[in-house]
Amino acid sequence: MSILGTRVLRTEDPGFLTRGGVYTDDVEDERLAGACHVFFVRSPVAHAVIRSVDVSAAREAPGVIAVFTGADLTGLPALPPPLPGMINDLMNQPLLARDVVRFVGEPVAMVVTQDPYQGEDAAELVDVDYDLLPPVVDMSAATTADPIFPDAHTNVAASFGDADQFDPALFDGCEAVVTRTIENQRVAPAPMETRAAAAAWGEDKDAGGRLTAWIPNQGAQGTRAVVASMLGIDPASVRIITPDVGGAFGAKFGADPEHGLVCWVARQLGRPARWAETRAENMVAMTHGRAQRQTITIGGRRDGTVLAYRLEILQDSGAYPKFGAILPSLTILMTPGPYAFPRAEAAAVSVLTNTTPVGAYRGAGRPEATAAVERAIDLFAAEIGMDPADVRRKNLLPAFTEPHTTAFGAVYDSGDYTTALDKALAAAGYQDLRDEQAKRRANGDVVQLGIGLASYVEITGSGSEAGRPQENATVEVHPDGSATILTGTSPHGQGHSTVWAMLASEELGIPVDKITVKWGDTDLIPQGGGTGGSRSLQQGGAAVQQASQELLEEARQRAAGELEANPADLVFDIGSSAFTVAGDPDASVPLARLAETERLVVRSVFSAPGATFPFGAHVAVVEVDTETGKAVLRRMVTVDDAGTLVNPLLAEGQRHGGIAQGAAQAFLEEVVYDADGNPLTTTFADYPFLSATEVPSFELADMATPTTYNPLGAKGIGEAGTIGATPAVQNAVVDAVSHLGVRHIDMPTSPQRVWRALREAAAPPVAGTAAPAAGTSESRDAQ
Amino acid sequence: MKVRLTVNGQDRSDDVEPRLLLVHYLRQHLGLRAANVGCDTTSCGACTVLLNGKSVKSCTVLTVQASGQEVTTAEGLAPEGDLHPVQRAFRAEHGLQCGFCTPGMVMAATGLLAENPHPTEEEVRAGLEGNFCRCTGYHNIVRAVLTAAGTMSTGATTSTKSAQ
């Protein structure tokens, strides 16, 4: 029986459960003996000129080895633009702020001590004199505010499409048109493990040097490139080692200035250096996610047919443009989602503000697209008084098995969106829920029921700059009958050790527990795309399968020689992991023996024809207390079709986690700044991190439409939950109070926002004083 | 200050800074690194250990406060090479992904089951409210604790012993 498709328990778990993972702060290595500790002094203000930095008192504090400021960073190259050609090149973040600070949390100085407690003490003695500048806090003010980089003459970091070129006739012929500005609020990725680094230079550091750095990351090869570039050294002089990584969610791709600085300190002082971030630092200095303001307009016929859809995006990039600045390009790519809109258009502008830079966060651009279109569908349904499920059915693309190219250039590999929706509705008992809702409405119950839907399609495993999506794997069988896999992907919770071993075991007959999977050491694995964009299984896993099959072919040739038989006459017996000669069961040679005389090892690169497009449908059921405004998530029913599953247990785990994070954005989480750019959510006491009491158990329905883009038939599953759950939960909260006149509530749908929306619906504001919490709304009937 | 305590059954005595947190003592002085530090505000529970059999957040206990008491960490829950029923249930139900919250979650669950051996799902969720996980959505963690409650109540005697 095939091991593929079975619920194999994770091989990595016993270690995590007993001694705990070995995260960067846990690494014990002789190269790190006597390491000093780096503590960062960060800007407490959003925007200011640095008049002076006095480190004299800090230098005298107990245990202080050195204190460095931006002025000390000599001999480092000017940083290249982070995304050349895509964003304004004049908006670079220096490793340490020199003349100006641009967000609360920006590193200004480093205190290096013997012991980490001493660093925190001494950092308080660094005296920085700031001359405050007016901060740009709200993204809508950014385009007209003074430029945060005066030389750039603008706060626009990037733009995609041009709203000025929108078709004025886009909504012609529509019987109903709704438009609304909605928030896809800023959230914190908040992996449980904060950022960290440990760095040691080899003895030959003066002769060019060689750096070994332990950094939690999502792809060591990308991290190596960024670290080398920050230090101005050849990437070949850098070895990145990836310890266990305690969650990443997109925010640990590449490397941040702090990582480069820790390596710089180690070189400067000639001794190893370590850094482990506090949560308070993490909440202001690790990139944030989302942060889009979207204006959606949708129009169509009163029979539910959508004729036109428009999406206009304002992206808050934070103080320094990073990946967040180009997130809207992914959002735009997915503008129409799973719908067959005859006309659609989109444009985006990414602007700078004096806030924490924005980067990738689970879904990265696609949840924003889905949130926009799913809110639009519900607004349209409410406008024409139709059930949102019916509006979706009427507009979903019909099932297709040949690739479908959208007006935005996305090539959907395969999809059956209506079946996904119908399965989700059936699993939820949709009609019963609507009946229950009607009953509560008729009774005027205080606690109302809300049912929210989201249909989605997303993009996973998209291509690299080199072109087609690809990943490499090396498989080696050892003489003792064990095997080793080297992969270019980089797990941080996904369970690649187990699944990659399953894939090799399936081909080679070697038990899963005798297969070791290695990743994240750039000396061992110089190439690799890492883990992100839900790419790992469909590319990295496919590469493991391909390498295993190629290894088996190589072994067949060797076995033929050994058994003096024609290779075509050999049969591979998976049970004994050996080749036998057909019709002569005594003539047999195990793989392990074929590895005795010469290494039995194959490296292979798998290349996919393109990205895949998983899809699904989510149904959220909430109860909303109409007196307090509190929304409680009661049920989440989801269909997430990611093609063929290799390990359903792990795929379900990915869905659970994504659903929870998506739901958390919908009703709970938000990074908040005051008008001066001070972050108000800098700890887990202030930031409403989701706890076990705030979500129910999730109900997962099965659907698996294999893709033809890889032999596994697998699409990505890592981000689906986040993409579907967020709009489903938001739609459910709005739905719970829609009969009271509420059409929209911005995320997070906090009790305060729900309560305010109810108050405003009960006593509509005077025209021209639209309530900010509910966004601006306009609807009109056209002929 | 002088401290003397029992950690995973072993007597320890040390001279520590009065402000040294128990979690840092465990991690840095004893090399027991299962308990992690995930926040600065006693919110996340990644550092949860048992103090005299009751779960506590070791980031909010001074080492000197633990003097004279018994500390159990994830490392000491089961004999070397074995898993405690709670640990086994976390594996069986896929109750961990990145693993960072896991040792604290396992200790919190062990403490919870010591106080309430037959919790409902709601009681499990309430009991783990102070332990954050970013990966699992809590779904399989809750399953794991309920599964562990089942196996521990059906006569796994070693479990109650090691949970103290």
Image (cartoon, coloured by chain):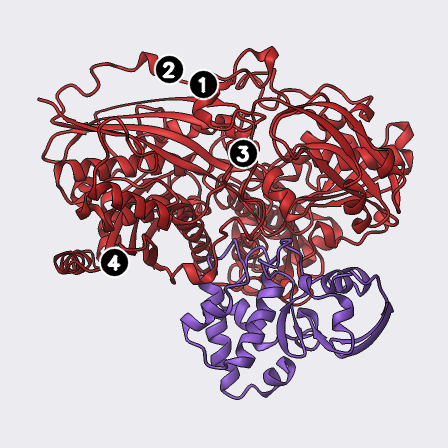
Chain colours: A red, B purple
Q: CA distance from mark 1 to mark 2?
A: 8 Å
Distance (Cα) linking label 1 and label 3: 16 Å
Q: Is residue A713 visible?
A: no
The CA distance from mark 2 to mark 3 is 23 Å
Question: For the residue marked with disc 1, what is the amino acid?
Answer: Ser
Residue at the disc numbered 3: A359
Instruction: Specify the quadrant of the image occupied by residue B23.
Output: bottom right
**Circle 4 is placed at which residue position?**
A428
Q: Are marks 1 and 2 on the same chain?
A: yes
Q: Are marks 2 and 3 on the same chain?
A: yes
Q: Is residue A92 above or below residue A764?
A: above
Question: Which numbered tag is attached to residue A162?
Answer: 2
Using the rendered image of the protein, determine whether residue A154 is visible from the camera's viewpoint.
yes
**Vertically, is A681 above or below B98?**
above
Could you tell me which quadrant the N terminus of chain A lies in? Answer: bottom left
Name the residue beneath numbered marker 1. Answer: A159
Give percent across and percent down for residue B78: 66, 76
